Amino acid sequence: MKTAKQLVYDFVQQNAYRNEKGIDTLAIANELGMLRTNASALLNELVKEGKLIKTSTRPVYYRVLDNIRDNEEMSFQTLIGYDGSLRKAIQLAKAAILYPNQSLNVLISCKVGCGTTSFAYAMYCFARENGVIKKEAPYVKINCRHFSKNISVLDNELFGIGHDLNKSCFMKAKGGVLFLDNVDLLDAKQQSQLYTFLETNIIYSEDGTKSKECKDIFVIISQSPQSNMQFERIIPVIIELPELKDRSIKERFGLINHFFSNEASHSMRSIEVTSETIRALLLSDFDYNVKELKFEIKAACANAYVRVVRDIHQNIQVVVNDFKNQVRKSLIKLKNNHIEIEALLDSRNVLIYDQNDGYQTIDTTKHGNDMYLEISKQYNELLELGINDHGISDVITTHIQNLFKKYNYLKSYDSSLNLKQLSKIVDSRVIEIVSHFFQTSKKELGKNYRTNVFYGLCLHINSIISLKESQQRITNDQVVQIIQDHPSEYAASVQLASIIKDEFDLDLPVHEVALIAMFLIETEDQTKNNPVLLYILHGETTASSLRDTTNSLTQCYNAYSYDLALNIDTHKAMEEIKDLIMKIDKGQGVIVIYDMGSIKTMLETIEEETNIKIRLINMPITLIGIDIARRCSMESDIDYIYHLTHLEMNKMRNYEEKLNQVIVTLCHTGEGGAIQLKRYIDQYSKLNMKTIPLAISAKDELIHEVSELRKTYDIHCFVGTYDPKIFGIPFIPISKIFENSQEEIDRILMFEPISSSTFNYEDVYQYLSEQFKYVSISKLKSILPGIIDELNTIYHFNEDQRVGLFMHMACLVERLLDGKQSVPNIEKQKILSVFHDEYQSLSKIFKPLEKAFHIIIDDNEMTTILMIIKRI
């Protein structure tokens, strides 16, 4: 009995004569009594097996492969317009390939997006099918546009790494086809080397000392019509591909059908497109021709896919509003082409592209299904964060409007950006990706971003990729707030994250994407009322060089400098620095990085005289250099100097001024509250820290007063009614002091957790009272929580560890009261030896428990407790 596939094949073979084009899916399904989808699936299997071929028309027609008739035509028949606008180009291509003795090299001249890649690949297939090259012959393609920012990498691709000619693209393509796309982007030296090869079939190394002959190679190159290069002098066959606007309405309709069919196949959903949408696309002009048409359709399908992402059985429905305004406006031109367009649409209101009838030709992108998976992934991630459907819709809708742009690098980068310096510390791929993202985001979001946002993004993305940190730097609440309040910026950041995943195989979590979005949220010029940076370093240009480098890399231009000459009078230097600080201060103060000497004293004096906030950061690089140079002149052992310097630097890092620690009590009005709080702390605290009361509500005045205190004291913390949030000094609210017992005050002041009042053990006690025979629960309540809290103060347990240890200790007491012996612990000697001091401490902590229940916790049990605490 014949299979369904054999029945389909036989039917096509027997009935194809009815129509020269072949038979469509619907006719086959009706004749054989099959579902249309099943017939379509079987027909596509037969095409893959090489038994049938299908047309690029709509509807699709199938017929049996006629080796005599089709062998020559099959490759070019995959191209829409093969019998129309591409007819002349195909004839030239065939003539070049089939030229006697050896194929003639070909120059393709066309504007961006006219289908160069598809045409070149079809030439390769035609050459294979006609035996001009072997079936396994290589096909090597290099798109020079991809290397426009890195000529050295392009050199390696073209002529071999380290001038190894065997690794050149010419040797890789030997016996096959070499396709060089956008050759008008080559520099003068690369052009010269390519000219030489095309004239002689010989490639030379850069220094001319090495050469290789490559006769057995068919070269296809492409350039724009405006190119000044003279390849036509040495390439005999020149092929011109038409722009989309020069193609017939029928061919444009074929391209539109082709791209929608591809999206149906990729999304695994049938796509329904309104006739109004088809009309608009047929009448639209696209600057980047066929490629832009493809991306517009991809973006619209993604936009429509979001609406049905939750219903896997629902078709994707594309309407004209899924496209940008330019496409919608094109409908005003309908009057001029009405008759021709309506003949194609045949009065259909909706065109359906079946997912099983989606046909594949040459797809130059490595994506496809990924786009729809990304949309689903984003939807699920946002849903898990608790964002409502409306918020998700805003984010995803904006995201998919931009998503297709990650497949398109046609736009040129902003040449005004000074990328040369940035490329020294940032991966060139990062700069290229962020450059494109930066430009498209400015247009999509309608915001005029400052240049330093671009530089900040480059530096931030580079650090993510280099460090690959997984630590979450913003909370989930902050993530939700960013997504809800700024869906457009977040969606743009999702687009960047997807590009990073493709390029670097790094999947950024939602919180990292939200962090990127923060770069896009702030758009106002914030150079006013911000602190500024000032370098003050010894030497003629030391500080100014660092200033220029900082401003160049950040593009913030908020760094300044003062080069402190070695022979300048100190008083004069201080006056000049004072004038500079008064000039550059924006009202929020100056952060000064300095190296050594009396600079600190000068700056402290200037701060007192001008009342400008000055914060000092000492980087003693000059002092370290002087010390190393002095040692080098005295010692001959480099390792001795190296290690001695490290010792000195470690001492410098670890050095802290031994100031007395103080606690500062605060209140907004009057000293009474601050003084009472001071007296309470002094009476009950045993830390022996001095307590100083301050009653200052004006922040500037408080900063000045605290700055004075810091010259004499090390401020341990603020305690009071408000947190001033200055100098990074920790704050303890007054409520925490009075809501806990007087005995807990030192734990609070030392930031130790107070847990027994917050954890409710009642459920645990209820369970234990039902299980235990010997332990008095009331006695356990009075003793064990205090012991657990004392251990928690030392080891900082989380809740699970705290409850787990509590249960272990309670069960241990029951077991010992039941007279059961401890199980020997084989790790006892090792554990007790390594943690001897902690063993001693635990023994003291457990004494009240042993005394209350008249038990002895032996070394085996102590070892087990230590292993629990240390998570061994």
Image (spheres, rainbow, N blue to C red):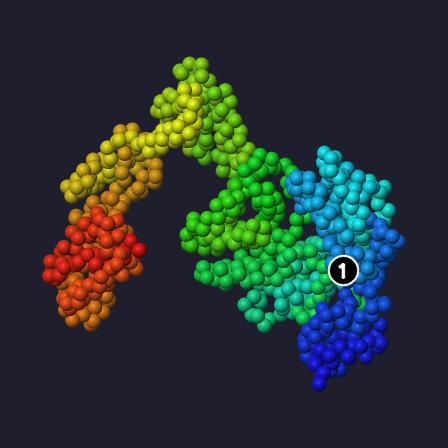
Residue 390 is left or right of residue 87, and the answer is left
Question: On screen, 311 above or below 433?
Answer: below
User: Which residue is located at x 16 percent, y 51 percent?
Assistant: 844
Which image quadrant: the C terminus?
A: bottom left
User: Which residue is located at x 50 percent, y 29 percent?
Assistant: 546
User: Which residue is located at x 68 percent, y 59 percent?
Assistant: 297
Q: Is residue 379 visible?
A: yes
Q: Position of residue 601 (x, y in %)?
A: 35, 22
Residue at the bottom extreme of this rendering: 1
Q: Position of residue 92 (x, y in %)?
A: 86, 54
Q: Is residue 614 visible?
A: no
Count up the numbered dots: 1
Residue 273 vs residue 636, the one in the foreground: 636
Question: On screen, 251 above or below 205?
Answer: below
Residue 592 is left or right of residue 321, and the answer is left
Residue 600 vs residue 807, the one in the foreground: 807
- For badge 1, the amino acid type reads Lys
Q: Splitting the image into 4 quarters, where does residue 51 fall?
A: bottom right
Q: Splitting the image into 4 quarters, where does residue 229 fall?
A: top right
Which image quadrant: the N terminus?
A: bottom right
Q: Position of residue 670 (x, y in %)?
A: 23, 37
Residue 353 vs residue 705, the one in the foreground: 353
Dot 1 corresponds to which residue?
Answer: 135
Identify the secondary structure beneath mark 1: loop
User: Which residue is located at x 71 percent, y 64 percent?
Assistant: 360
Question: On screen, 597 above or below 141?
Answer: above
Q: Position of residue 275 (x, y in %)?
A: 72, 66
Q: Residues within 10 Å of mark 1 (few under 14, many from 20)?
A: few
Residue 711 vs residue 86, the one in the foreground: 86
